[in-house]
Image (tube, grey):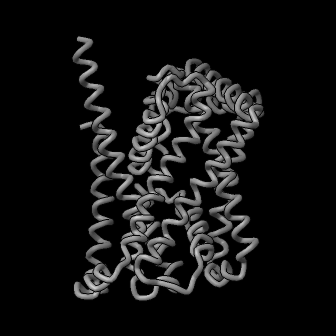
Amino acid sequence: MNKNTLYKILSFIFISAVLAGMLIYMLHKDGVENILTILKTADYRWTFVCLLLMFAEIILDSLSLFIPLKKSGYSGKFFGVLKSDYICRFFSYITPFNSGGQPVQALYLSKKGIAMSRTLSILLIKYIIYQAALLTWAALLFAFNNRFFFSVFSGYLWLIILGISVSLIAALSMVVIGKRTSVVSRITTSLINRLSSLHIGKRSLIKDPESLKQRSDTAISNYGKQFNETVCSKPVMAKMYLISMLQIFSYLAMTYTIYKALGNSGVSIWGIITVQTFLFLLIAYVPTPGAGLGAEGAFALFFHGIFTSNLNMGNLFWRLFTFYIPFILGSIFAMCNKSSGKKEEVQKE
């Protein structure tokens, strides 16, 4: 068993354990009778709206990628991008900091006629635009709902500042790399030279520094070229930004539909979305698979005064629609893609 397989197994165990822990905690805290009462009295029309928002969120996410891919020569159909998005989410969920999805997605899309380096560049640009849209939502909601914001987050402002800072630094770093490729290339070359001089025992930390420098320069150059082509195309950027704004709203509004489905009232949709936006900024960089434990803990912490007697059920429903269902669908697409890949290899032989 290789390390990747072992890590996937451990991630699955962790994700399953978190879900099992939530269910056991609910049974202990709320009791079976109370849980059944909540489920019987829930308004499932709102859960249906939540389901629609869940699918709308990933369709919009795929659309914001499909537009620049088409401009770059992508020959496939929209469903191929949608499928790659589910696969991306699956691998993101089982890797720390959601880091494993984009390389897998780029590899999948590269089979449709676009170089992997170009696809990765487009994905990084899409990430920048998504972060810009997310920070726009945060700024607007804070500006128009600041009293409610302070009533919820007054004791945790340092966490909010940390979450916003990480998102801002990550996005700005991608912009700097795209606009100053020569500077980044020199820094990368210098770093590789220093690391190659280090040794672990008798072995050098980097075996082939010249090859790594060449690959690094090529990747940075390709990203810079694609970045500037996309940035110069204002219509493409505007479309991606507007789609990302709608995508983020779809994600944030899911919490409000769960709030209403469980019979809660008293807080407007903009109040719920305000809490959810800054909660999302906090959990985006939790290093556990699927932000497990961090996401559930943050939801319980910041929504305990909003969801009245059904906080735990709200937490479970929220994770179900924002994580577990997409995770299951992503695993199905990933397995189907693996199976079809094996069939193609057999046919070639």
Residue at the image position 73 percent from the left and 64 percent from the top: 139
Q: 264 or 183, which lies in front?
A: 264
Count up the numbered dots: 0
Residue at 58%, 22% (x, y): give it.
73
The residue that appears at 46% across and 77% down in the rendered structure is 260
Q: Is residue 232 above or below residue 138?
A: above
The one nearer the camera, 291 or 83, is 83
**In the displayed structure, does residue 266 sit left or right of residue 140?**
left
Location of the C terminus (image quadrant)? top left
Q: Quadrant of the N terminus?
A: top left
Seen in the picture, residue 309 relative to 302 is either above or below; the reply is below
Answer above or below: position of 185 versus 300. Answer: above
Percent across and percent down for residue 212 are: 56, 23
Residue 2 pos. (x, y %): 28, 36
Q: Is there any visible trace of residue 321 in the rendered image?
A: yes
Left/right placement of residue 166 relative to residue 330 reads: right
Asked if 131 appears above or below 279 in the picture, the reply is above
Q: Residue drawn at (30%, 26%), measured in percent from left and top?
A: 341
Give the farthest residue toward the top.
Answer: 349
| Figure quadrant of residue 128 | top right
Instruction: Describe residue 109's horizontal placement relative to residue 127 as left or right.
Output: left
Q: Residue furthest front?
A: 45
Image coordinates for residue 248, horizontal then vertical, percent: 58, 57
Q: For residue 196, say whether it is visible.
A: no
Q: Quadrant of residue 270?
A: bottom right
Residue 109 placement (x, y as % from top left): 47, 29
